[in-house]
Image (tube, rainbow, N blue to C red):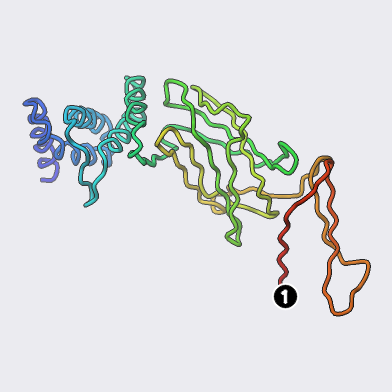
């Protein structure tokens, strides 16, 4: 009975579309393509999604749609739909990508889209120094569905240790922020250095107003990285040790620092646990 109802709903939605009754077709086609996609009827779901998108494009007066009792901007729905078509369609990829870029300029978009649908990523677990006191790692991004190159506004990798301390790697300023078709290599850097083991929490690629996001399972999947001291001759280093001279009634420490350049001022915060 459910299957018959779904087929009848599709027929009604398509009939509304053919009659150019786009407002009536939108609500029916939206639920239909979601049902068939979630049921792994990808070809039917993709065709219904194309009809749904065409209905939205022919209704410029619509500003938002109510989904799960929440008003979602049409620009966000279109961007998400174009990316779904890009990920599932074997043809017309250039068309859907161009349509996405047009709607992605809308500042009300605020779309968060699964990164794995369009990209394959590999994060190197090996840390190195890209500059004095700057820890870095390599990120490989394989663009498996995007037909043309695109500039990214930023790349952020978030890590966390067992004390819930966070470290964020960002795309290096010296790197070309463009994703080309095929494999790409990016340099991510951080100046927040905390020694120990950190798990991957999330990776975000920002394109226009859209965030392509990937969540990690952390230690469960073995996706972690080890922060260890890395040495370079132009590093700024600080050594905290017991003082050579004891002052009665005072708790003191000696601090030694070294740098290849003259330093007039630096700020240091030292936390002591009893």
Say left or right for 197 vs 70: right
Query: Which of the 4 image quarters holds residue 195?
Result: bottom right
> Where in the figure is residue 33, as x and y percent of width and height?
22, 36
Q: How many marks?
A: 1
Query: Which of the 4 image quarters holds residue 89?
Result: top left
What's the residue at 49%, 33% (across, down)? 153
Relative to the observer, which residue lies in front, 10 or 104? Answer: 104
Say left or right for 239 vs 140: right
In this view, the residue farthest toward the front is 264
- Work out whether 218 lies above or below 56: below
What's the residue at 85%, 80% (across, down)? 249
> Where in the figure is residue 82, as x and y percent of width and height?
31, 30
Say left or right for 140 vs 113: right
- Work out whether 40 lies above or below 164: above
What's the residue at 59%, 39% (across, down)? 123
Name the residue that disc number 1 marks: 274
For the C terminus, the image quarter is: bottom right
- Disc 1 is placed on an element classified as loop
Relative to the observer, which residue lies in front, 47 or 258? Answer: 258
> Where in the figure is residue 13, as x and y percent of width and height?
11, 34
Q: Mark 1, residues whose alpha carbon is within 10 Å: few (<14), some, or many (≥20)?
A: few
Query: Which of the 4 image quarters holds residue 134?
Result: top right
For the N terminus, the image quarter is: top left
In this view, the residue farthest toward the right is 245
Relative to the observer, which residue lies in front, 106 or 147? Answer: 106
> Where in the figure is residue 250, as x and y percent of width and height?
84, 76
Say left or right for 267 vs 144: right
């Amino acid at each position: 009975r459910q299957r018959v109802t779904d087929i009848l709903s599709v027929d009604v939605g398509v009939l509304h579309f053919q009659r150019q009754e786009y407002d009536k077709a939108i609500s029916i086609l939206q639920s239909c393509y979601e049902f068939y996609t979630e049921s792994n009827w990808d070809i039917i779901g993709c065709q219904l999604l194309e009809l749904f998108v065409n209905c939205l494009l022919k209704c410029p007066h619509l500003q938002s749609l109510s989904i799960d009792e929440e008003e979602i901007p049409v620009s966000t729905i279109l961007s998400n739909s174009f990316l779904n078509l890009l990920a599932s369609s074997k043809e017309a990829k250039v068309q859907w990508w161009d349509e996405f870029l047009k709607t992605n300029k809308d500042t009300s978009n605020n779309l968060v889209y699964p990164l794995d649908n369009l990209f394959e990523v590999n994060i190197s677990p090996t840390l190195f120094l890209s500059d004095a006191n700057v820890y870095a790692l390599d990120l490989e991004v394989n663009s498996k569905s995007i037909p043309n190159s695109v500039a990214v506004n930023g790349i952020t990798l978030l890590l966390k240790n067992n004390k819930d301390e966070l470290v964020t790697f960002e795309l290096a300023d010296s790197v070309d922020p463009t994703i080309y078709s095929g494999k790409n290599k990016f340099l991510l850097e951080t100046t927040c250095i905390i020694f120990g083991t950190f798990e991957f929490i999330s990776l975000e690629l920002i394109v226009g107003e859209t965030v392509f996001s990937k969540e990690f399972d952390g230690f469960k999947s073995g996706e972690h990285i080890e922060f260890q001291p890395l040495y370079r001759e132009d590093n700024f280093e600080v050594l905290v040790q017991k003082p050579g001279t004891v002052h009665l009634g005072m708790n003191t420490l000696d601090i030694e620092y070294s740098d290849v350049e003259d330093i007039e001022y630096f700020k240091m915060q030292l936390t002591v646990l009893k």
